[in-house]
Image (spheres, grey):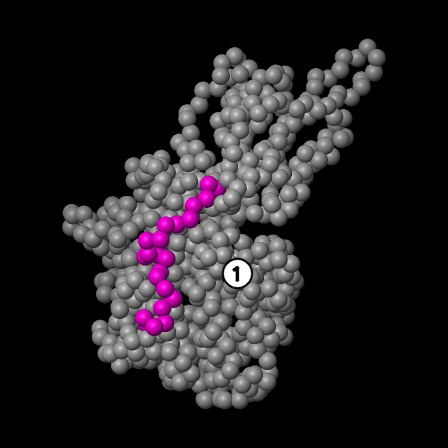
Amino acid sequence: MFADVLGVARVGADDNFFALGGDSLTAVKVVARVGARIGIRILVPTLFDAPTVAGFAAAAPAQSAGADPLWDNETRQTSELSIAQQRYWFENQFDTASAIDDIPLAVSLSGRLDVSALAEAAQAVVERHESLRTYYPTGYDGPYPVVLAAARAFPELEVESVPAPDLLRRFLDLALTGFDIASQVPLRARLFRIEPADAGPGVAAEPSEYVLGFVAHHIVADELSMRGLTAELAVAYAERAAGPQPTWRPLDLSDTAYAEWNQDPAASSIGIDELAQHIPLAPAQERMWHDVVGNRNGDGNMKAAFEIVDEIDTPHLEAAVRDVLERHEPLRTRYPSTCYGPAQVVDPMSDIVVDLETVRTSAVALDSAIESFVHRGFDVTIELPLRLRLFETGSHRTVLVIVLHHISGDAFSFGPLLRDMLVAYDSRRNGVAPPWPALPLRYRDYAMDKRAELGDERNADSPAGAALRYWLATLADRPARLNLPTDRPVGTVRCTAGETIPFALDGLLHAQLLAIAEQRGISLFMVLQAAFALVVGAFGESSDVTVATSLAGRSDERLDDLVGNFSDDVLMRIRFDDSDPLAEYLREVREVVFGAFAHPDTSNPRLLRALREHGAATSEPLFRATLILHTIVADAHVVDGVVGLTSYPIAAVRAKHDLEFAIRDHYTADRRPAGVEGVLIFPPAVFDAATVGRVVTHFARVLEVFAAGFDGTVGELLRSSSSSGRADRLRTA
């Protein structure tokens, strides 16, 4: 297991995991995989305390946290509300007078109106959608749905005559009145008849104008489903005005059936076909979905480009792309909003058309053309999340560009994506189907298992509930905001164009940092994170900073060959004082990292709401600086050894955060340290390059002082690193 994760041929019983290039992120993977294999949940610090194979094997059972919820047979708790509904129910009961989760919609009606037919049409729509006639009282086991008959839930369409100047005020009165969804059906409708102006004696009055106002609580609808209800109402009204009952296709799934399945897919009697449109999002996808819906600026795009110097066989490449799309469902998945929350909709291969476009351009214009292509956003609710294009610049010189939206993949997804595409391309050129083995599971199965594993965050004994309690306790009294010294005001509209400042540390300094980490019982990632927090704190004049990193989330080895989004952004609140001994500070960072990695599945939007509900002074976003570490082993790239295929650099970047360190530590094929390199990504609309350049320089100096064996206080370290000369082994541009 050690050898597989580290990418080495052999690991001896007494070899040190971290001396072979292991770090905090790979430690999480090893611990999870060993625990899954032997059926227990092992604590991550166990590997740090016993980093050899022999030591870990002896210590793991004693340091077990009990059975892993992914693998035990304990019956899952169920609730008759879907997971999304539970969240909105809790928020509503916290303040039933609030209209913050109400969704208003006003429709202007022109022409002669049959009010009776409109009222009958509205009742028909309410009859069709049971969620519109459901309220959610509290029972012994929590909230549960009560579905009313349509005639009782919506007995009549109220008509109110209002002068034109009063229309907006009266509509706002309707829209801003909260629901108590424990006792009220979460839908209101009112027809406003605009009183015609008095034209004077003997002058015929103008025909009445109407505005139909709807308000629904978010527990039963969202903005997109409200538009769908409006369309259905128009159909029903047209048919009722003509006489007959509305005729429409039966719904595939009732709200109650969906909620039962949402809580326990295995126990539900609903068939797979019926659920094709109602696959829930995995937690990582859900966080991403809320960030990108309605935002097509390309921030969620991940991209890769490869130069092909051989002649390309486009038809066989298109066939290979089809093979990969069929193999990896996330590549042909859309994420629409439904009245149950966002869902995964996997398009069948019969609906997929692969037409690989070739764009001819000059070598001078190539980078600009690629930049325009990779930064074009996706509407993930209606578009598939993958685009490919060939850019041809001359005879037998082509660049293949791949853009994958983050909701359907993570950085590690490019490995199986490219490997499978190359295997399929080679197979198709030889007239055969790709000979790959079946994947061990589908992403949709992972998503459902993950949600079942986490459980209900309102249940204190569930993993989700424990994670939420951990983060509330960890972040409750933190400073509301990290005030970084910007060169220009941060605008209300985020400018995502980014610039980079590269840096590199040589192999000797890399080796020294690894040695210091081993002596201290920590990882290289912890060393980098400790230095990063100090530098960000000094930059923002704060000794209490919250930074973040990305956790791969592929602890289960069955996920290695899947394309999909498994990554988690995890927060780390790091505090320090000038008088803290460095050794004590590093121990504190170690515990912070352990705690963060043990509780990765609480979404930032949910955490932000929970903090505010508990009275914490906090601001959005929860963090402004992030550090991500990737380990690169020589000869491990997916494209190495493929004749005529080399990586092509994409220069343009996006700044997702104020300060984002993207770092790679390199090792030779026999796992000797070969240096650390990376870039600091920043938004030039906010910072000058010279300003953030000082952050890069200070970061490198702190690491050099670390490597030299410094053993004083944090304050002495900061003063020493800020006053020392430029690091000899730092290369910046």
Q: Could you say where residue 413 lies in the image, as x and y percent from the top left?
A: 34, 57
The residue under label 1 is 469
In the orientation shown, which residue stands out farthest toward the right? 201
| Part of the protein shown in magenta | 60-82
**Residue 374 visible to an observer of this rendering:** no
Magenta-highlighted stretch: main secondary structure?
A: loop
Crowdedness near tag 1: few (<14), some (14–19) or many (≥20) residues, C-alpha within 10 Å: some
Q: Quadrant of the N terminus?
A: bottom left
Q: Could you say where residue 261 lies in the image, as x and y percent from the top left?
A: 39, 41
Q: Residue at x 59, y 58 (%)?
A: 611
Task: Decide which of 285, 126 is in the foreground and name it.
Answer: 126
Q: Could you say where residue 722 lies in the image, as x and y percent from the top left?
A: 57, 84
- Please, what is the three-letter code of the amino acid marked with disc 1? Arg
Q: Residue at x 35, y 60 (%)?
A: 68
Task: Decide which of 79, 424 is in the foreground and name it.
Answer: 79
Image side of residue 543 versus residue 705, left or right? right
